Image: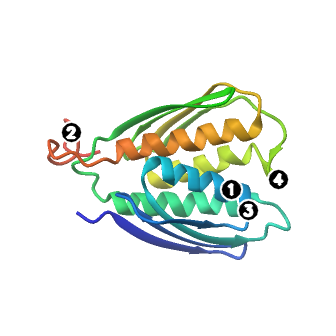
Amino acid sequence: MVRTASIRRETTETKVAVAIAIDGGPIQVRTTIPFFDHMLTLMAKHGLIGLQIEASGDTEIDLHHTVEDVGITLGQALRQALGERAGIRRYGQAVVPMDEALASVNIDLVTRPYLVYNVPAVPGQAGGFDVDLAEQFFRALVINLQATVHLSLSYGSNQHHILEALFKAFGRALGEAATADPRIAGPLSTKGVL
C-alpha cells in the first residue's frame, strides 16, 4: 500500500505545498521561517516520515498565517495519505526529554478532531518564533488530520527546548499510530469504522 499525498493551498496570504510519505522518504522543509523549518524537520525525522514543504506568506506582517496554513495543509496531506486508516495501529504515544523540558504526546487516529494542549504559557520567542504559534499550528493540523491529540508539557523553562520536545514527541507518536500492522484487518475499531 502506497501511503503518500501531495496538497497545495494558496490564499491571498500564503502559498503552501506539502508532500508526505507516511512510510519514509526525503525530508526538505522551506517555510521562510528557519526555526519552524527546524521543528518540522525534527518532527518528520523522529516520526520516520518523508516530508517536503514549500511555503511562503506575508511574514512581514506576522508569522501566524504561514504557520497556521502549513498546519492546515500538512493535516490534509496526512489525512489523504492515511486513506481509510485500515490496518494501522491507530494509537501512538511518546514522551521526549530535551534537556530540562519533558513533553508527552498521545494520538488516536480516529476521525474525531480534538486537541488538548496542556502546555503552560511560556512568554517569549525561540529563534524569532513566538512560542504560542505552536498551539495554532497543532490545532490546524489536528482539525485537518481529523485525529484526537493530547500534547502536554510536564516541565521546562527554555522555549527552544520546550518546542523541540513537543515537535519530536508529536512526530514519534504519529509515526507509531500510523504504523501498518499485518495483524489488523480493516480499521482498529469494534464499530468497523474510525
Image marks 4 and 3: residues in contact by CB distance under 8 Å:
yes
Disc 1 from disc 4: Cα separation: 9 Å
Q: On the rendered structure, is 128 left or right of 105?
A: right
Q: Position of residue 146 (x, y in %)?
A: 44, 50
Looking at the rendered image, the disc whose residue lies closer to the viewer, 2 or 4, is 4
**Among the two numbered marks 3 and 2 on one chain, the one whose residue lies closer to the N terminus:** 3
Q: On the rendered structure, is 139 left or right of 85?
A: right
Q: Amino acid at mark 4?
A: Gly
**Among the two numbered marks 1 and 4 on one chain, the one whose residue lies closer to the N terminus:** 1
Q: Amino acid at mark 1?
A: Phe
Kindly identify the residue that appears in the image at 49 percent across and 57 percent down.
75
Q: Position of residue 26 (x, y in %)?
A: 46, 66
Number of other residues with Cα within 10 Å of mark 3, as a class: few under 14, some 14 to 19, many 20 or more: some
Disc 2 from disc 4: Cα separation: 46 Å
Looking at the rendered image, the disc whose residue lies closer to the viewer, 1 or 2, is 1
Disc 1 from disc 2: Cα separation: 38 Å
- 45, 193: nearer the viewer: 45
Disc 3 from disc 1: Cα separation: 5 Å
Q: Which residue is mark 4?
A: 128
Q: Amino acid at mark 2?
A: Lys
Q: Secondary structure at mark 2?
A: loop
Disc 4 from disc 3: Cα separation: 9 Å
Disc 3 from disc 2: Cα separation: 42 Å
Q: Which residue is mark 1?
A: 36
Q: Secondary structure at mark 4?
A: loop
**Could you say which disc has been placed on residue 191 in the image?**
2
